[in-house]
Image (cartoon, rainbow, N blue to C red):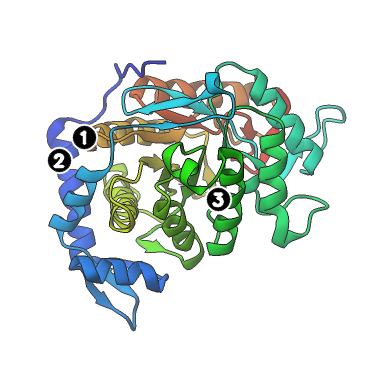
Amino acid sequence: MPANAPLKILTEEQIHAIHQTALGLLHNTGVVVKEPRARRYFREAGASVDEESQRVRIPPDIVEAALKLAPSRFTVHAREAKHTVEVDYQRLHIEPMIGRLNILDHETGQRRRTNLQDVANLVRVADAMEYYHLIHSGAIMPSIEGVPLHASHAHGYLTSVRNTGKVVKGSPRGRATAEDCIRMAAALAGGVEALRERPNVFTTVNPITPLQHDQGQTEGLIEYASYGLPIDVTSEPQAGATAPVTLAGLLAQQTADIISGITLAQLVNPGTPVWYGTCGTIMDLKVGRIALGAVEAGLINTASAQIAAFYRIPSRGTGATTDSKQLDMQAGYEQAITLFMAALGGITCLFYPGAIEAALTISLESLVI
């Protein structure tokens, strides 16, 4: 569906200032890059790399050249052709939350660990809902009840693709994990070359804010990029904790996190499809907890959509988020506010519907609502 963006909170001058500040952060402060291959890519492109501290300082011209290589539009192919997703920086798609550690049991009303049957049920419901386009999948879960930890990504991905004809997300958590998901996606596509020509899987990579790329997820980014598979680079800054307390400062730091990841993807494989992704919000300093249902989360999403549009690349942000542990009035207000601010602001991939308790728990009822 077209992503109309009547809600704008940044002027063109403010967007440009955020961009220039982010470039300055990457050039002067730099980012810590834990993965040796990634540091090599940056060094060969002309960045300054300190191997002892693992800090990479990236000149603005390298970043801006990489951003120009990222496509404004790309296609992610579904097993059922009618569910193929045409990603566009001016078109809205919705990705429901599936892979959470806990689930609010729809029969007992009690919170418990998520198992494979829950993953299957959640994916089936998302498959049946016409307004869900991309499936978050069980591959992303840190663990699944009753499944060996080292194999949870494989069981989560396989269970997900068995229960939907839509596009399913793969895990990026380490080289071996990424390779497993890519091999399964290739089997579904009909081979590696078919996968390259018709990507049927995407992933999300999270920089560690502020200004760090860990080894595991960076390994995953390199693997997905080497096949030309779509990558969402999502930063998760928390104002007052892992980011400046001002939203302008947060947006500049977040942008530096994201565009450094996008730059790496383009250095690995020019033209790799990417999203500019945000999961930014504030820290509730009274209790030391992330506040995903806060109105600031909506403001950050709206601003992020404008920044991504400035780069002419698709954006990804949170919506329908709540800090409530139940489907109560608080959940209703927070989910409505964050959903509409993200959608009206022009976010082109809206994720988190179905999650409650600051995304620690998933709910079947919330997935439908």
- Mark identifier at residue 276: none
Q: Nearer the viewer, residue 242 or 148?
A: 148
Q: Is residue 21 above or below residue 341?
A: below
Q: Give the alpha-carbon distance from disc 2 to disc 1, as whole Å.
A: 9 Å
Residue for badge 2: 16
Contact between labelled residues 1 and 2, with CB atoms less than 8 Å apart: yes
Q: Is residue 128 above or below residue 276?
A: above
Q: Residue 13: give x, y in percent of width and height.
A: 12, 35
Disc 2 or 1, which lies upstream in sequence?
2
Residue for badge 3: 182
Contact between labelled residues 3 and 2, with CB atoms less than 8 Å apart: no
Q: Residues within 10 Å of mark 2 (few under 14, many from 20)?
A: some
Report whether 111 appears left or right of 300: right
Q: Give the alpha-carbon distance from disc 2 to disc 3, as whole Å.
A: 37 Å
Disc 2 or 3, which lies upstream in sequence?
2
Residue for badge 1: 310
Q: Residue 119: give x, y in percent of width and height.
A: 73, 37
Q: Nearer the viewer, residue 42 or 297?
A: 42
Q: Residue 14: give x, y in percent of width and height.
A: 17, 37
Q: Is residue 205 above or below residue 124?
A: below
SS state under label 1: helix
Residue 221 visible in the snapshot: yes
Report whether 170 appears left or right of 197: right
Disc 3 or 1, which lies upstream in sequence?
3
User: Callout 1, which amino acid?
Assistant: Phe
SS state under label 3: helix
Q: Residues within 10 Å of mark 1 (few under 14, many from 20)?
A: few
Q: Residue furthest bottom?
A: 52
| Residue drawn at point x = 79 percent, y = 44 percent | 115
User: Callout 2, which amino acid?
Assistant: His
